[in-house]
Image (cartoon, rainbow, N blue to C red):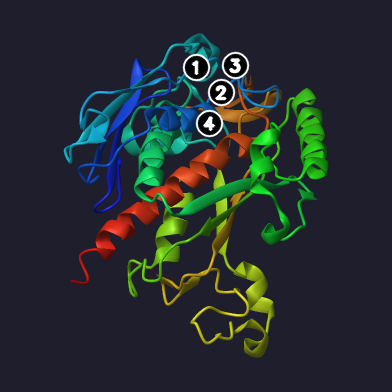
């Protein structure tokens, strides 16, 4: 099982949803970086469960404890070890499905691949793993002090925020439970999530991410393209079904004369349909992309499935689940973006004297 991410700035993680703890080891972070540990915890607080009435009500403090790699508030250049204790597991909520396969979960594939599975909350396949990514992403953000990464909820179900990101005030993203930087649309999205929740159902949506102040030159031209690594990172998030950057799929409908980004004399471009990436390398313009999330697979209503013997059975989801995963995934998208960029930041330093 692959548990590591990155080449130079790397994260290796461990733990299960209903185990004693989750955690990880960050390698490759340069020595001498002054870490704001409160800022790291703040990022975890943005992701943690129970923060509003439109997310899972599992109550986890998600308090990170650093074990190594930091001395006198600065990184030492050695491995940064950390742990996050699990304190509010309710494993009995999953006893009814220990011999059954929930549709669109990892239950069936894990069972067939490994011969067994931890059915308590999905074990290693649980999105609780993403708390580890938040910690590494928060460190990466501080390494990339000048880079601004802003993700936000751009749709819930059929409710789309149509405004271009240039017209949005990212300071408003954290002003509402759904993390949409437009109050009118935020209220519509929250209302829709509450309606779906009452039905015992779930709904998907999209997150848009905008990255400013990335220097020219991040990314490799062949197999390590910047957009490919961003796509790989985003598609590693539980429930993600799609990734597009720049003009995305809309670009397929355009003519080349409409799509080309004409240059200005200073090397910037008049338009930015490239999404800040050309030839797999950042060009200094804003990087922007969108990530699509499916509806959460666990439904709090009865539905038919099969058990280990292939027999049809009826099950009903129990416990505490997100009716829409998108609001809590916003900081996850930012964290993985920061990790990808931190990796390229360090790699870029190896290319030129």
The reply to whether callout 1 and callout 2 are in contact (CB within 8 Å) is yes
User: Which residue in the structure is indicated by mark 2?
Assistant: 49
Pointer 3 or 1: first along the chain: 1
User: Which residue in the structure is indicated by mark 1?
Assistant: 60
Rendering coords of residue 74 (x, y %): 25, 35
Mark 3 to mark 4 CA distance (whole Å): 19 Å
Residue 295 visible in the picture? no
Horizontally, residue 85 falls left or right of residue 74, namely right
Rendering coords of residue 318 (x, y %): 61, 17
Residue 256 visible in the picture? yes
Quadrant of res 202 = top right
* In this view, the mark in front (3 or 4): 4
User: Which residue in the structure is indicated by mark 3?
Assistant: 319
Mark 1 to mark 4 CA distance (whole Å): 11 Å
Residue 47's tag is 4
Q: Name the quadrant of the C terminus.
A: bottom left
Please tell me whether mark 2 sits on a helix, a strand or a loop: loop
Nearer the observer, 63 or 242: 63
Q: Give me the residue at 77% from left, 40% from top.
A: 186
Q: Name the quadrant of the N terminus.
A: top left
């Amino acid at each position: 099982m692959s548990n590591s991410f990155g080449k130079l700035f790397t994260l290796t993680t461990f733990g299960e949803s209903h185990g004693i703890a989750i955690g990880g080891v960050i390698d490759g972070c340069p020595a001498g970086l002054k870490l704001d540990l409160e800022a790291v915890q703040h990022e975890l607080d943005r992701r943690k469960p129970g923060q509003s009435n439109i997310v899972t009500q599992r109550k986890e403090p998600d308090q990170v404890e650093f074990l190594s790699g930091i001395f006198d508030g600065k990184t030492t250049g050695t491995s940064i070890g950390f742990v996050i204790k699990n304190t509010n597991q309710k494993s009995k909520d999953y006893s009814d499905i220990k011999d059954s396969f929930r549709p669109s979960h990892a239950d069936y594939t894990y069972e067939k691949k490994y011969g067994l599975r931890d059915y308590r909350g999905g074990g290693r396949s649980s999105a609780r793993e993403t708390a580890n990514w938040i910690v590494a992403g928060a460190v990466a953000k501080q390494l990339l002090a000048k880079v601004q990464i802003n993700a936000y909820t751009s749709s819930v179900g059929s409710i789309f925020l149509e405004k271009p990101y240039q017209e949005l005030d990212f300071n408003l993203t954290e002003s509402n439970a759904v993390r949409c930087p437009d109050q009118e649309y935020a209220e519509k999205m929250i209302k829709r999530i509450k309606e779906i929740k009452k039905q015992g159902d779930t709904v998907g949506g999209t997150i848009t991410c905008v990255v400013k102040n990335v220097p020219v030159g991040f990314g490799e031209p062949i197999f390590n393209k910047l957009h490919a690594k961003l796509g790989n990172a985003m598609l590693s998030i539980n429930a993600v079904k799609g990734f597009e950057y720049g003009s995305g799929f809309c670009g397929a409908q355009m003519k080349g004369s409409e799509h080309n980004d004409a240059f200005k004399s200073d090397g910037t471009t008049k338009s930015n349909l490239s999404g800040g990436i050309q030839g797999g390398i950042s060009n200094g313009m804003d990087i922007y992309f969108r990530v699509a999330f499916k509806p959460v697979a666990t439904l709090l209503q009865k539905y038919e499935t099969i058990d280990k013997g292939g027999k049809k059975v009826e099950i009903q989801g129990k416990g505490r689940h997100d009716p829409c995963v998108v609001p809590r995934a916003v900081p996850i998208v930012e964290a993985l973006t920061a990790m990808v960029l931190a990796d390229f930041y360090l790699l870029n330093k190896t290319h030129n004297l």
